[in-house]
Amino acid sequence: MPISYYGMRSAKRVGIAVRSARAHAGVTQAALADAAGISREAVSRIENGRHSARVATLAAVLQELGLEIVFWPHDVTIPEVPGPAQQGSSDE
């Protein structure tokens, strides 16, 4: 599932992306936590932007959701990936 959020420079925005991906996958916080090897409370804190997760922890959560961390320079414009509602639509 493509998720594209510009300016993911805050824990809150990362949390929104994690919650969105988890919901789209139909996975509970408990199931995600178990698969990633962390507590359900830690997943909740990540999703609510109240957790300063280690990179390894965040990478484990994202891997379970089929996502990855990608770094881009601030001065590069990244084209937005179409979401599920946009895929297949054409204005031509």
Image (spheres, rainbow, N blue to C red):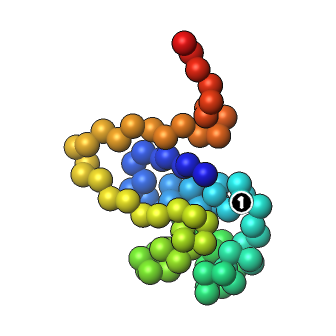
The quarter of the displayed image where residue 34 is located: bottom right
Which residue is farthest top? 92
Which residue lies at the image location 49% right of the left edge and 46% below the top edge? 4
Which residue lies at the image location 61% right of the left edge and 51% below the top edge? 1
Q: Residues within 10 Å of mark 1 (few under 14, many from 20)?
A: few
**SS at circle 1:** helix
Which residue is the site of mark 1?
Answer: 25
Q: Is residue 32 above or below residue 18?
A: below
Which residue lies at the image location 72% right of the left edge and 72% below the top edge? 29
Q: Is residue 86 above or below residue 60?
A: above
Q: Is residue 6 above or below residue 48?
A: above
The quarter of the displayed image where residue 23 is located: bottom right
Can residue 13 be spotted in the picture?
yes
Which residue lies at the image location 48% right of the left edge and 74% below the top edge? 59
Quadrant of the image for the C terminus? top right
Rendered location of residue 18, percent (x, y): 59, 61
- The amino acid sitting under disc 1 is Ala
Q: Is residue 35 above or below residue 63?
A: below
The answer to whether 31 appears left or right of 66 in the picture is right
Q: How many marks?
A: 1
Rendered location of residue 60, percent (x, y): 53, 77
Can residue 48 be spotted in the picture?
no
Rendered location of residue 58, percent (x, y): 49, 74
